[in-house]
RNA sequence: GCCCUUGUAGUUCAACGGAUAGAACGAGGCUCUCCUAAGGCUUAAAUAGAGGUUCAAUUCCUCUCAAGGGCACCA
């Protein structure tokens, strides 16, 4: 159990015993400054109104009951916060825990182990992966890592839309006829390889080649491994779409109007506001129907407890109907859709609209070639997904040398160097001054205590961008320590510090692994 | 027109409704006889505007202004 959980549990016990209260909402957070302790809780402020009492007094009353071996001091402060001061013993205990758990430090037990699927990227197989696919790609990959650390069984999936209109258009583009829309070098290449006169057939072949020759290698270079590539084509060819329609009819969820077949999505008034077409009046099936069949497959056939889809923000109008459909087929609350905001490409200070159709885009490959995978991943991951981000390739190239990822990796390299130099040297237990940890040492350990707590938090709110910020904070604490405390002194190794530094190396590695970024031994 | 996102230092981004709004880059000033100066220390610099809710608002609500996206029997 993390320190945070321990505090929460203890406070709930006190509330129950002392005040006969349950289910009170309160938060346990990190104190903003070290003078105010390490953890702080606002429960007294939450109770102030209820009791019509000064929150500080309530805080003092509660603090009295909270004495715990993990803390040297628990006390109420100013407006009514209860502050917890970690004891040195707890810090040292954590250090031992890290060295013992090694790469497992950060793993937590889920209250209930879930089978979770994360579907992301899923870019149409009509061209190479571009920068636009970077956000969802890296965020999805890291979210999957986090959810596994949090104790769930996670599968990564890429939906290949190798069917429908865009495949036909791809075919026309390869044939270079009047209906062509896509252009670019890859289309020219495909035109040389594929012959035929049926646009859809040509498109299918083109999509297959694009997937194998451009998309899959790019995904691999991005450092992502999908557990499953799902082909939309198979839904159609295996008759799963027709079966889905039968199923919906059996459940009495469809009706005919104006020659088309509709799904009663508006019945789910909370999620969608009107009914949606499944079969057009010309007899064509809509993509929506295929998508329902796809989700039926996820939930009904493959039995996922939770499905998370990362979509581009331009699909947000589609979210309500998809959620309604999933509810209608009986999986309420099990589909989560996260929108990745648009990424704008800037060139010479001007926004350039990326367009696959106009052949105007920067591919993932180009970017990784220019600045490297570590910089690319870190850059994308640092941005919260609900905000639009600007990307200037020229600036990115210039600035890649200054990417904060190096700050983090440099900490790791410095540690490796210390460990290397300490080999074979005489060990001395601690500094002559005694057992007391220096402030920078304490700060460093406290930062490491946060790692499992962060995993827990991100597994709940999916805010993956907090991980790179944590990595920077940990590196920062290390660099501070490095300036203040020497591990090797007069050609002798301070043993406790060597252990501390080894623990930091371990946590840095765990963090970087979760981010999919390398931990170099030399820089 | 309706709906959804988003407005934080010069720039790119942080900040579960909490205590003095943090970083990085950029600008200025220090700092290597000692484990990697890709480091450390330091100065200047920000919540778009107006109301409201709250003990407490960058965060929630309303309006204004600004940016982006969506409103199909397209996928």
Image (cartoon, grey):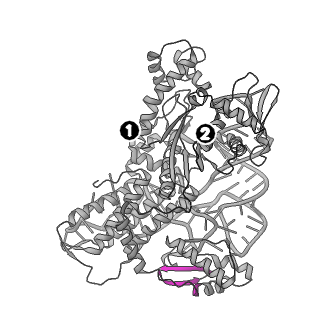
Q: Nearer the viewer, residue A508 or A401?
A: A508
Residue displayed at 67% across by 82% down? A55
Element at badge 2?
helix
- On the question of residue A239 being in view, the answer is yes
- The dot on residue A297 is 2
Q: Position of residue A429 (x, y in %)?
A: 25, 78
- Dot 2, how many residues are within 10 Å of its Cα: few (below 14), some (14-19), or many (20+)? some
Q: Nearer the viewer, mark 2 or mark 1?
A: 2
| Label 2 and label 1 in one chain | yes
Is A283 in the magenta? no
* Residue bounds of the magenta highlight: A63-85
A296 to A19, vertically: above or below: above
- Dot 1, how many residues are within 10 Å of its Cα: few (below 14), some (14-19), or many (20+)? few
Residue pushed farthest front?
A: A250
Q: Nearer the viewer, residue B59 or A450?
A: A450
A277 to A23, vertically: above or below: above
Is A69 in the magenta? yes
Residue displayed at 48% across by 31% down? A128
- The dot on residue A369 is 1
Q: Are marks 2 and 1 in contact (CB under 8 Å)?
A: no
Residue pushed farthest right?
A: A257
Mark 1 — on which chain does it sit?
A: A
Q: Position of residue A438 (x, y in %)?
A: 36, 78
Residue displayed at 55% across by 51% down? A115
Q: Nearer the viewer, residue A480 or A111?
A: A111
* A372 relative to A339 in the view: left or right: left
Sequence-wise, the earlier of marks 2 and 1 is 2
């Amino acid at each position: 159990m993390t320190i945070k959980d321990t505090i929460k549990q203890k406070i709930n016990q006190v509330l129950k015993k002392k005040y006969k209260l349950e289910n009170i909402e309160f938060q346990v957070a990190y104190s903003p400054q070290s003078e105010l302790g390490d953890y702080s809780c606002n429960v007294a402020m939450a109770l102030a109104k209820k009791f019509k009492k000064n929150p500080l007094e309530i805080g003092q009353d509660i603090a009295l009951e909270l004495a715990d071996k993990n803390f040297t001091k628990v006390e109420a402060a100013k407006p009514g916060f209860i502050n917890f001061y970690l004891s040195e013993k707890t810090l040292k205990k954590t250090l031992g825990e890290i060295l013992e758990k090694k790469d497992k430090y950060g793993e937590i037990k889920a209250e209930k182990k879930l089978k979770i699927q994360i579907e992301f990227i899923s870019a149409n197989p009509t061209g190479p992966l571009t920068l636009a696919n970077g956000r969802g790609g890296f965020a999805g990959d890291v979210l999957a890592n986090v959810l596994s650390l949090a104790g769930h069984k996670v599968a990564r999936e890429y939906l290949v839309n190798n069917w429908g209109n865009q495949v036909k258009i791809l075919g026309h583009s390869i044939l270079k006829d009047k209906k062509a829309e896509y252009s670019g070098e890859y289309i020219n290449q495909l035109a040389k390889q594929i012959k035929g006169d049926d646009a859809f057939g040509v498109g299918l072949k083109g999509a297959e080649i694009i997937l194998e020759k451009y998309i899959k290698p790019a995904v691999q270079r991005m450092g992502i491994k999908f557990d499953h590539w799902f082909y939309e084509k198979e839904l159609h060819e295996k008759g799963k779409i027709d079966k889905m329609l039968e199923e919906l009819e059996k459940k009495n969820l469809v009706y005919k109007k104006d020659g088309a077949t509709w799904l009663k999505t508006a019945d789910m008034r909370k999620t969608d506001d009107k009914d949606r077409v499944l079969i057009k009046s010309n007899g064509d099936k809509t993509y929506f129907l295929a998508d329902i069949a796809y989700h039926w497959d996820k939930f009904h056939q493959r039995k996922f407890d939770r499905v998370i889809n990362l979509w581009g923000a331009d699909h947000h109008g589609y979210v309500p109907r998809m959620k309604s459909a999933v509810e209608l087929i009986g999986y309420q609350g099990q589909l989560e859709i996260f929108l990745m905001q648009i990424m704008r490409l800037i060139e010479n200070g001007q926004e350039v609209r990326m367009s696959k159709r106009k052949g105007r885009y920067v591919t993932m490959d180009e970017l990784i070639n220019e600045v490297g995978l570590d910089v690319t991943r870190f850059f994308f991951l640092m941005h919260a997904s609900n905000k639009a981000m600007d990307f200037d390739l020229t600036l990115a190239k210039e600035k890649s040398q200054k990417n904060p990822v190096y700050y983090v990796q440099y900490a790791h390299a410095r540690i490796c160097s210390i460990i290397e130099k300490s080999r074979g040297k005489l060990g001395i237990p601690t500094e002559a001054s005694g057992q007391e940890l220096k402030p920078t040492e304490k700060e460093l350990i406290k930062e490491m205590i946060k790692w499992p707590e962060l995993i827990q938090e991100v597994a709940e709110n999916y805010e993956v961008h907090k991980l790179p910020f944590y990595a920077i904070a940990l590196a920062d604490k290390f660099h501070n320590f490095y300036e203040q405390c020497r591990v090797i002194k007069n050609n002798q190794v301070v043993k406790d510090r060597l252990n501390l530094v080894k623990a930091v190396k371990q946590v840095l590695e765990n963090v970087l692994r979760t981010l999919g970024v390398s931990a170099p031994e030399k820089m």
